[in-house]
Image: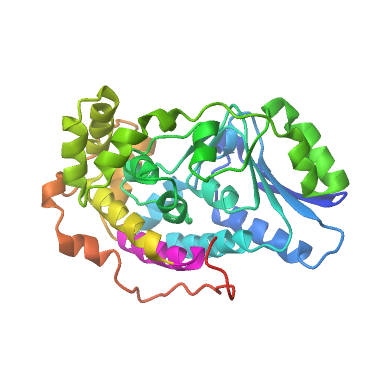
Amino acid sequence: MSVLVRKIGKAGRITLDRPKALNALTHEMVRAVAAALDGWEGDPEVRAVVLDGAGERGLCAGGDIRAIRESALGDGAWARAFWRDEYRLNARIARLAVPWVALMDGIVMGGGVGLSAHGSVRVVTERSRVAMPEVGIGFVPDVGGTYLLGRAPGELGTHLALTADAMGPGDALLCGFADLFVPSADLGRLTEAVAAEGAEAVRDFARPAPDAALAEHRDWIDACYAADTVEEIVDRLQGYGEPAAKEAAERILGHSPTSLKVTLAALRRARSLGSLEEVLEQEWRVSLAALASPDLPEGVRAQVVDKDRTPHWAPPALREVTPAEVARHFADPAEPLTLRRPVGRTGG
């Protein structure tokens, strides 16, 4: 089994256990986490759930994108079933009755963000690298990523989404992806304390976080990314006169043009949606549309399968991505994802 589930003291413990694959999520892993919650919800002995990842590299690198690619090249059934259960789990974590303590040590990307950043106690360390890098593989931020990115200060979320840049611990705290900084050497003792005392013990291990690197770039980020289109964002970045802005433009231009335009639209729409559930339902529509597009299998091929880092996007230029193509990603699918929305809640 690729997920270790056990109850220790007052804590339910979940460890993602595919270290050779950087704990990338399979459908079976998603179902195993959900089954563990089935067993613990209503158990008065469980006062917290602690999530971590096996190995030294990180919590989770995201979904199993090789499997998603194979599904996209076929009938798409596996990817649809995987995303349906994954998004339901993301929503469930956000409304869990007991604290969900996510140890976001090392690499935390894509699906790993979905399992951690919607929790109630999100811990980063000096090793944390948190990202939603989907535009680099011809996809769009999902697992509630557009909910989080859309609510980051100013236009920081837009910058992170379009560049696919990773956040260190300070930036993860600044952007609302994490709550506390704890040195990685203390995570073992922290977990023991939660098992003995409950989630409130985490606060005893919190330390001042490193500075947020993005904070010093807010001027040009907010000015450039406030534009209405990706083309104008790139133009502003290239003309701003700041080397970091020009470098950001270059990174953006290396990503899927379709993914970039759909991502910007998804982020702007997510800001006006009231709940995480509504955003996940939007991401479900977008994901199903992307599954039927050529850029997703091509991006995974270039980055992960052949590793030639030369994806051939279709279309290859931003100006060739039509408004109709962007709108197609937000159309109601034949298979709706309907999530229960907690009464009276407007946040995630």
The region drawn magenta spans 274-290
For the question of whether residue 76 can be seen, the reply is no
Q: Is residue 8 left or right of residue 245?
A: right
| In the depicted structure, whether residue 25 falls above or below residue 270 | above
Residue at (39% x, 59% y) in the render: 271
Identify the residue at the far front of this view.
Answer: 219
**Residue 124, position as x, y percentages in the image:** 61, 36
Q: Which quadrant: the C terminus?
A: bottom right
> Where is residue 242 shown, x and y percent of the image?
25, 25
Residue under the point 41% across and 66% down: 273
User: Could you say which is closer to the camera, residue 35 or residue 247?
Assistant: 247
Residue 285 visible? The answer is: yes
In the image, residue 200 above or below residue 187: below
Q: Main secondary structure of the magenta part?
A: helix
* 143 or 57: nearer the viewer: 143
Task: Out of 32 and 220, give the one closest to the viewer.
Answer: 220
